[in-house]
Amino acid sequence: MNTKGLDYTLLALVIIGAVNWGLIGFFRFDLVAFLFGEMSWLSRIVYALVGISGLYLFTAFGRIRSFQQA
């Protein structure tokens, strides 16, 4: 099964989440809350998608390792 497109999409979401956390840490500026509102239903969806993407990409470690051994 080819999951390359899904991997890239979820990686983009995780990068967006990482940039947001960087902005929060350095400047106390929450980009997601600024764009979608403080804990609105849309911002909660964005946060949930970033979290799920991170959990999914955690499985990439196993896939990368299996590619290296092949």
Image (tube, rainbow, N blue to C red):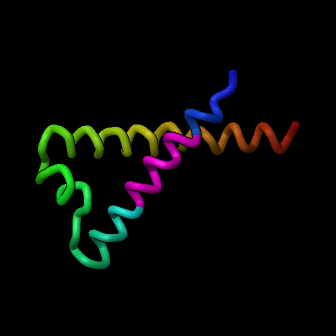
Q: What residue is shown at x 34% (from left), y 64% (from top)?
A: 21
Lateral position of residue 35 relative to residue 22, left or right: left
Single out the residue that lies furthest toward the bottom.
Answer: 26
Residue 18 occupies quadrant: bottom left
Q: Nearer the viewer, residue 17 or 62?
A: 17
Total marks in image? 0
Q: Position of residue 43 (x, y in %)?
A: 21, 45
Considering every residue shown, the one lying at the far top of the view is 1
Residue 20 image offset from top left, x and y in percent: 33, 62
Q: Residue at x 80, y 39 (%)?
A: 67
Q: Examine the rendered structure and indicate whether residue 53 appears above or below residue 23.
A: above
Q: Is residue 61 left or right of residue 32?
A: right
Magenta highlight: main SS: helix
Residue pictured at 12% horizontal, 44% vertical = 40
Instruction: Tell me if 30 is positioned left or right of 64 in this view.
Output: left
Residue 12: x %, y % from top left: 49, 49
Please give the range of residues in magenta: 8-18
| Quarter of the view holding residue 27 | bottom left
Q: Residue at x 22, y 70 (%)?
A: 29
In the picture as drawn, the residue positioned furthest to the front comes out as 35
Image: 27 above or below 2: below
> Which quadrant is home to the C terminus?
top right
Q: Is residue 61 magenta?
A: no
In the image, residue 54 lies at what x, y percent?
46, 45
Task: Left or right? Give the position of 6 relative to 19.
Answer: right
* Image quadrant where one finds the N terminus: top right
Quarter of the image holding residue 69? top right
